[in-house]
Amino acid sequence: MIGYTVRRLGQAVIVLLGLTVLVFALEHMIPGSLARAILGSRASPGAIAAFDRVNGLDRSVVSQYWTFLSHVLHGNLGYSYRLNQSVDSLVVHELPNDLILVGIALLLALGIAIPLGICQAARRNRAFDHLTTGVSFLLYSMPSYWLGLLLVAGLAIGVHVFPPEAPQATSPAGVLADPRALVLPVITLTLVNIALFGRYMRSAAVDTLAQDYVRVARAKGLPERAVLTRHVLRNSLMPVVTLLGLSLPAVLTTGLVVEYVFNFPGLGLTYFNAAVNADYPLELGITVIVGIATVLGSLLADLAYAVLDPRVRYG
Amino acid sequence: MAEVETLHISAESPGEDPASASAPEVVPAVARRRSFAAGFVENRTGVVGLGIVVAIGVFCFLGPLVYHSDQIHANIALTNLAPGRGHPLGTDANGFDILGRLMVGGQSALEISLAVALMATCFGALWGAVSGFTGGVIDAIMMRIVDVVIAVPAIFLLIYLATVFRPTVPLLIVVLSLLSWLGPARLVRGETLSLRTREFVDAVRAAGGRSSRIVGRHIIPNALGTISVNATFQVADAIIILATLSFLGFGLPPPAVSWGGMLSQGTTYLLDGYWWEVYPAGLIVMVTVVAFNFIGDGLRDTLDARLRER
């Protein structure tokens, strides 16, 4: 296990370094220069030279990358000139809101998708299975904003049950203080994730049900409910652990879109606004955070899998 | 999203129930030799999906030849007209005919997504095959590169690049392909790892075949089934991500028409009850994506059935 962990950690470190190289390259892809993009097209050559000197942009690429890397390692993700605020302070301020939205939606989605997948597998090819598979197929094929808009049209405009907009407070406590406004964004994100996890859960449970130990459990007279909870559930959860770690990019993508649709005060919306305002440092700072989260997610998933399934660490 | 689709295949294909595939338990000798196309035709979902895709293709590319509408000049005398005579699906806020607009918007959506699926699949398959076949340090480096690009969700990179560069059709194709080849690369690498230990590869090697010949003539053709299933899902993914990008306002700039852009503009009028500016665009995206996913599922089931027959 130790060997596997060390190897996997080493991989993650290499990928994180690669990520910083990628983001550094993206920053240097800006046509003209960063100084020109920030100071504007009428900035004097003197002002540009001064900006380059202060930010070290007149030094060699290697030395600039080195500075960038050391900044990232010290938690300095750059400075948003439009908002006149450091990117890390923005992230610290808004990440809790995202954790609330994504966290609730993921918990709900898993809480529904796991039993649903097992029920589908247990009643395979019957009406219940066909119906739920069909619905999840439809959800899976929907752009998330389209689902959000349908919910707004139905539940906010058609019948006025929930407000069409997410909580507009900026603090996590304020967001939680307005649970009714949280309903539609959470439902949208939850439905998309149920479709994502439900498909895997169903096929994992179908696989498990075909195993010999399930036949043995049934043969020794275990009630079907016990077979499903004790044997099928546990063994079908493993692919979902991996999926949960790997699905982070998809979840964050949906999060960005949902935040845009419902005007939710999170990092996704901030990223969108940064893009609209051509606030490159903010965009890249958030990109680094998102990338780190993804790498850590897949690392944790692999390690959890190794703990759950001994075949992985000795393989 | 691409990597999720990839996972979906590897996670579901072994366990997919035999009943959903069209193969009977006992396969007669004649049936065993039937072509892939014949197997696919027996698969209902796949055929339905193909039918829908063909219909949408005809609608988008041949429709404008029959149904003429001006999609270049805004006409404020015709804004927000409800469906009726002359405009079966009404008009939008700039007086453009919605039905005609759906056709034109579909052209770029289909062109870009098909091109992306093709480019991403070819490049990804080659990358994965070379990586898996070579092994060792080169494999490790090649796969870490995949890990790095996969670490940043495509939509974030796309939005960033759309703010830095002005989106055009070729640029969108290139950028989307650069972000979509990772799934196929991982998938084909996995396939290659199992293929390269097979006897026929040893045979080619013993006969003096070079590595490039083994990869190009033997490994890739043998992984072609998996690759083509994935390519279909890639089209569906590309349509979704493209529609999302234009919905957010980072797609092709006007006068280009896109389904996502139509939806985004129509959303403004959701409260006014101008349903014809919202639902047709949303529905056509959904139906197109469902259709490509149907084809992918159908191809996969046919492929699974054939593998079982062997």
Image: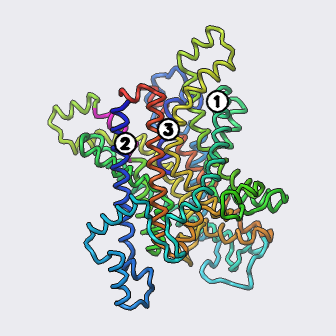
State whether residue A245 is above or below residue A178. above
Residue A9, numbered circle = 2
Badge 2: residue crowd in 10 Å (few <14, some 14–19, many ≥20): some
Mark 1: secondary structure: helix
Q: Which residue is mark 3?
A: A242
Contact check, label 1 and label 2, Cβ < 8 Å: no
Residue A118, numbered circle = 1
Name the one closer to the observer, A236 or B259. Answer: A236
State whether residue B73 is above or below residue B292. below
User: Which residues fall within the magenta stretch?
Assistant: B185-196
B56 sits to left or right of A286: right
For badge 3, the amino acid type reads Thr
Circle nearer the viewer, 1 or 3: 3
Mark 2: secondary structure: helix
- The residue at the point 64 percent across, 59 percent down is A258
For badge 2, the amino acid type reads Leu
Q: Quadrant of the C terminus of chain B?
A: top left
